[in-house]
Amino acid sequence: MDILIVEDSATLRASMKAVLLAMGHRVHMAESGEQCLHMIENQPSDQRYSLVIMDVELPGLDGFETTSLLREAMPDEWIPIIFVSGDTDEASVKRGIDADGDDYLAKPVNRVILQAKIKAMERIAEMQHEMSRLYRELEITSKKDSLTQLFNRRAFNEQVEQLWLDARRHQHPCALLMLDIDHFKEFNDAYGHLAGDSCLQAVAACLLQVVDPDCHILARYGGEEFIVFLNNIDRNGVLALSGDILVAVEALGIPHARSPVSHFVTVSVGVSLTLSPENHSLQQLIGAADKLLYRAKNNGRNQVNLEELDSHRTILIAVDVCADQKALIAMLAELGNIITAENSKECLEIARYIIPDLIVIEQALSGGAGRKICKILKQSRNTAHIPIILMVDHSGGGMVSDIELVKPVAPEAIQGAVRQLIF
């Protein structure tokens, strides 16, 4: 063990050192509490102290004060500490234990007792070292997806938070990619789940070759879906990396006889990019990438669909009264690109194939079908994530949209609702 002796008496330091060296330990020495704290704070990673023998009567900081400061400075690392003192009354021993010491020796130190204490502490240090090793292994395992060995969703969420805060603080552009293996269910049906697992592992390994894990965060997000946070990257960089992913995955040459896209396994990619992260939230970035992934899949798969959060959003207005439609367009024109639908069929078709960022629906659309349309959109996998504002003549009937506004609606009310949902 590496043992630190903290003792201002040169004679006592020398005698204890001789005992410890004879036992085969490596010995380090400090003459004061201040020097002890400095040595522990600056100890090299390959030379961690396993035990401290602390004199209580030190100049400056005494042994109890030094121990308390040491414990405060290292809350996650426990080093056993044996106090050595000429005072062995009950009050002194109690104060030593209260100061987070582990044992107490009387001066002059008995050689046999010192050796016995060191052996006991050595066993404790070995058990603590083994527990620390197992804890580190468990911590690493808990962050990894067992199949692909990429970060799992929980670990991604923990790590991306800090990168996102850094990006906002320094106003660095960043992007988020959502990737999905095309027609993976059909792949499993055709080749079996073991082949499906092998496919996921191959795609994960391929992504590791394309995405630099030292700069970005790559994780398996669930099922056949992967997620990547790209830090400090512009539009050209995102497009280049996304294109490399498409090419690299298909180049794996994993046969997929049931895919209408290619003879081999491919992926679809949704990318949300922001040049001004300070104006957005992380959830907006993730939600936008998820929506763009669905759009890439709906548009034929094996492609990248990218959108900048800083650009205008697409707003679908589903109103069949011309005057009301014109009024809404005037209110919302500055907040996004407006698409209109004049009946329920048009609304559903546009929502499914265009996937707007927001839908504003009039309850009276198509003879009062507004609520029914909201339910259909929220129950569909492709459109469930789209926020909806339902405009009603009076409240009641149960919430089927994200926000319900009672007519007549003031411009500031509907503009505020739109900003709340998509900005």
Image: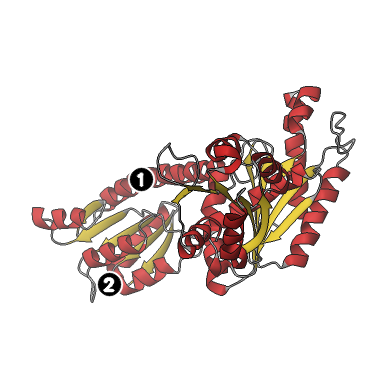
Quadrant where the C terminus lies? Answer: bottom right
Is 119 positioned to the left or the right of 45 in the image?
left
Residue at image coords 37%, 62%: 4
Density class for disc 2 (Cα within 10 Å; few <14, some 14-19, many ≥20) is some
Residue at image coords 73%, 29%: 185
Is 230 positioned to the left or the right of 11 in the image?
right
Residue at image coords 67%, 53%: 340
Q: Does the rendering let one see residue 214?
A: no
**Residue type at the position of mark 2:** Asp
Q: Does the rendering let one see residue 404?
A: yes
Residue position marked by numbered label 2 in the rendering: 8
User: Which label was assigned to residue 119?
Assistant: 1
Residue 216 coordinates in the image, percent (x, y): 66, 58
- What kind of colouring is applied to the model shown? secondary structure
Residue 23 coordinates in the image, percent (x, y): 41, 51
Is 98 positioned to the left or the right of 372 in the image?
left
**Residue type at the position of mark 1:** Lys
Where on the picture, by quarter, is residue 344? top right
